[in-house]
Image (cartoon, rainbow, N blue to C red):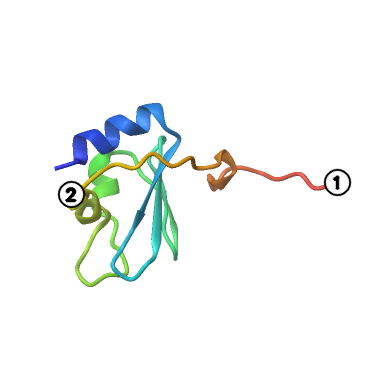
Amino acid sequence: MFRDLFFDGLKQNSAWVLEDDNGNEYTVFKDLTVVAPDKTYKCNSIDEVMAIPTTSSDQTVGDLIDHLRSLDFNHVSQNTHPTSRSIQG
C-alpha cells in the first residue's frame, strides 16, 4: 500500500529505516543501496530492493514496505550510508 509513497519519499529524504519481525533494521537509501544486518546491497531497481530477503521467515524488504501503516519521518544521518567515510585525525 505504501510502496509508491515509500519510494517517492526517498526523493525528499536521504533514507528510510525498516524493521523486520526479529527487530533487525534495513536502511534503504535514495540511491537504492540497502544496508541489511548481514550484507549491503547495491540495487539497480525498485524491484531489486523489494526482493531482498529479511531475517523473518519468508519475508522480503518488499513485504516490510507493503505492510507499512504509516511513514514516520525520522532523520537519518548521512554518515550511515555505507560509502561514507570518516576521517579521524
Q: Tell me which amino acid carries mark 2.
A: Asp
Tell me where residue 27 appears, x and y as whole percent.
Answer: 41, 50
Where 86 falls versus 56 (above or below)? above
Tell me where residue 64 appears, x and y as whole percent.
Answer: 24, 55
Image point (22%, 44%), residue name: 47
Left/right of residue 40 with respect to residue 83 in the rendered view = left
Q: Tell me which amino acid carries mark 1.
A: Gly
Q: Nearer the viewer, residue 37 or 25?
A: 25
Tell me where residue 57 appears, x and y as whole percent.
Answer: 22, 72
Q: Residue 66, which numbered label? A: 2
Q: Are marks 1 and 2 in contact (CB under 8 Å)?
A: no
Image point (36%, 33%), residue name: 10
The tally of labels here is 2
Quickly name the residue at label 1.
89
Where 1 falls versus 58 (above or below)? above
Q: Earlier in the sequence, mark 1 or mark 2?
A: 2
The secondary structure type at the circle numbered 1 is loop
Mark 1 vs mark 2: in front: 2
